[in-house]
Image (spheres, rainbow, N blue to C red):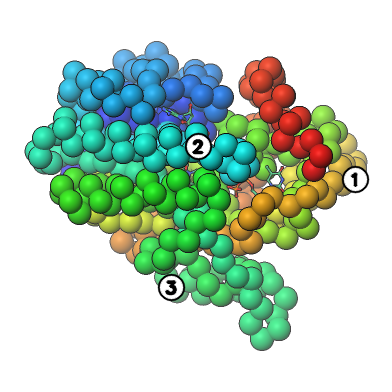
Amino acid sequence: MTKQMKRTIIITGGAGFIGSHVVRLFVNKYPDYRIINLDKLTYAGNLANLKDIEDKPNYKFVRMDICDFDGVLKLMQDEHVDGIIHLAAESHVDRSIKDPFTFAQTNVMGTLSLLQAAKIAWDGNWEGKRFYHISTDEVYGALEMTDPEGVEPPFTTKASSGKHHLAYGTTFFTEDLKYQPHSPYSAAKASSDHFVRAFHDTYGMPTVVTNCSNNYGPYQFPEKLIPLFINNIRHRKPLPVYGKGENVRDWLYVEDHARAIDLIFHEGKVGDTYNIGGFNEWKNIDIIKVLISTVDRLLGRPEGADMDLITYVTDRAGHDLRYAIDSSKLQRELGWEPSLQFEEGIEKTVRWYLDNQEWMDNVTSGDYQKYYDDMYKGR
Ligand code: NAD
Ligand code: TYD
């Protein structure tokens, strides 16, 4: 799909963590596009994430539930929308374990509602249209940790792109892998991915799907590992490490994800899937130690002074052992690569949270505190 001079794009979930970075990138980079941020503003949606661009003439916010089929259809027709970048979702695994219905409602029915609205609004005229669905690597399930030739992981291995990187196993998530979701969150995301592909295969809708690894960076809601722990270290609160802290995640700086989304929205092949990841595997416990020493250093505390905050708690039910993305296809076909080294990204991220205490105080007041206390009660 070539870049059009003028487009009108709905970005769903634009007030959330990743969505706000995508909205900012598109509003600033494409002054000729109209960007409509469609967001219900759940606990995870926060318009303060977009303060710097809210007055731009090419930006509009609409508070709406993606499950509101009539509302979405009317908006698409009234605004002559020709692209959808769909990020709105319930996104936290621990919440999905407590309340799976909300995840099925938003992630499955909400995605279907958007697809059906787009199908009717576009009425088979697919020229210049695009439905881009943002998904997660968690749909593939969990990978093994293997130890070739007795080498202590992480060991150096080679991706299918031919590049060497550190890994905790010899298998990776590739686009052709079978879906094996384990949590209600990943099961709901997997289902939504299938619906998107079904709309391509059945009706010819120009869709594209991407599955990305764990993101980190500014504006992430502090129920997720990195912002939660930065805030707890700052306030010298316990750090609840699930199980032994041995689980491995593949971390990508959020702005690198947003850049990939821009590229794939414009140049990704219709009907295709791309995995996005950083070739950057870390055990939770090792990241936690990096976070502690970075916060301590930046706050002028003796380095490592807060290591005793580490508190091992009952493991998450069905906790996936290892995620690791092979993003070689995206590198090979569209030339995307992560721009930031993890050490650099973590430093930037910690600084951002320490410098933006007001943002943190706003999102951690009220209902959040009750949720947090309930979540960790008895763990
Ligand atoms: P988030 O929880 O920070 O934000 C979700 C946003 O969606 C919020 O603004 C919320 O208000 C909005 N929303 C929720 N339900 C809605 C509804 N019914 N109607 C309209 N808006 C609604 O999530 P995130 O971490 O930014 O993730 C965004 C997307 O990226 C999700 O689809 C997620 O599955 C996917 N993803 C996330 C990660 C990650 O590490 N965070 C990794 C890969 C993929
Ligand atoms: P999280 O940020 O919730 O992302 P995901 O579950 O989607 O990977 O968690 C990242 C890892 O950190 C995961 O292995 C669970 C672990 N974790 C903890 O050990 N303690 C915590 O309080 C949280 C929120 C996560």
For marks 3 and 1 on the same chain, the one whose residue lies earlier in the sequence: 3
Expressed as whole percent of the image width and height from the top left, the position of residue 295 reads 77, 38
Rendering quarter of residue 22: top left
Measure how far apart labels 3 and 1 are at the Cα level: 41 Å
Measure how far apart labels 3 and 2 are at the Cα level: 38 Å
Q: Residue at coordinates 21% horizontally, 50% vertically from top-left?
A: 200
Disc 3 under 8 Å from ligand 1? The reply is no
| 60 or 135: nearer the viewer | 135
Q: Residue furthest bottom?
A: 149
Disc 1 under 8 Å from ligand 2? The reply is no
Q: Is residue 248 above or below residue 298?
A: below
Rendering quarter of residue 377: top right
Q: Which residue is mark 1?
A: 308
Expressed as whole percent of the image width and height from the top left, the position of residue 53 reads 43, 20
Quarter of the picture containing the C terminus is: top right
Q: Amino acid at mark 3?
A: Ser
Q: Which residue is mark 2?
A: 101
| 250 or 106: nearer the viewer | 106
Q: Residue at coordinates 39% horizontally, 18% vertically from top-left?
A: 63
For marks 3 and 2 on the same chain, the one whose residue lies earlier in the sequence: 2
Q: Residue at coordinates 27% horizontally, 30% vertically from top-left?
A: 9
Label 2 element class? helix
Q: Residue furthest front?
A: 101
Label 3 element class? loop
Q: Is residue 5 above or below residue 322?
A: above
For marks 2 and 1 on the same chain, the one whose residue lies earlier in the sequence: 2
Q: Which residue is mark 3?
A: 160
Inspect this view and state whether residue 17 appears.
Answer: yes
